[in-house]
Amino acid sequence: MIHLHLDSAPETSVQPSDAHAVHDLMWAHAAPRHHLEHVRARVVPGGIGLVLFIGASAADEADSRAEDLMDGVRDSGVLAQYRISAG
């Protein structure tokens, strides 16, 4: 389980539709090598809370897979409006 926070600009009003779009973007960009099993994206104070459930035999392997996925999706669609930080 990888926790991330998508930080929004202070003047930005985060909408539930943004969280749904992030959820869909994760699935659209996930490849078999990411071993993505489940995604949770919810509006939280200051942005969107993102949890990625990634199949891996060790935490560092899951971190690497999540980083690879986020590198591929970072500037896509609604994600371009957010800064990604560890949750």
Image (cartoon, grey):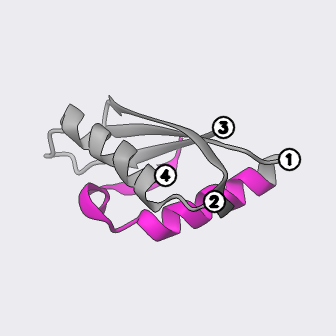
Measure how far apart labels 4 and 3 are at the Cα level.
15 Å
Mark closest to the chain's N terminus, 4 or 1: 1
Quadrant in the picture for residue 69:
bottom right
Mark 2–mark 3 Cα distance, whole angstroms, equals 17 Å
Magenta stretch encompasses residue 67: yes
Q: Quadrant of the N terminus?
A: top right
Q: Which residue is mark 4?
A: 85
Query: Label 2 to label 1, Cα distance in Å?
Result: 15 Å
What secondary structure is marked by label 2? helix
Residue 75: image location, x then y, percent: 34, 68
Q: Which residues are magenta?
A: 61-87
> Which residue, given by chain and number where applicable, does mark 2 sit on?
32
Residue 63 left/right relative to 72: right
Q: Are marks 4 and 3 in contact (CB under 8 Å)?
A: no
Kindly identify the amino acid type of the residue bearing the numbered disc 4: Ser
| Of the image marks 1 and 3, the number of the one nearer the N terminus | 3
Q: Give me the residue at 57% from left, 62% from top.
A: 31
Residue 14, image quadrant? top left
Q: Tag 2: residue type?
A: Pro
Q: Mark 3: which secondary structure?
A: loop
Name the residue rendered at 78%, 48% in the picture: 56
Lateral position of residue 28 relative to residue 87, left or right? left
- Give the amino acid at mark 3: Met
- Residue 57's disc is 1
Mark 1 or mark 2, which is nearer the start of the sequence?
Answer: 2
Q: Which residue is mark 3?
A: 1
Say which of marks 4 and 1 sits in front.
1
Q: Give the x, y percent position of residue 53.
A: 62, 39
Would residue 77 be counted in the magenta stretch?
yes
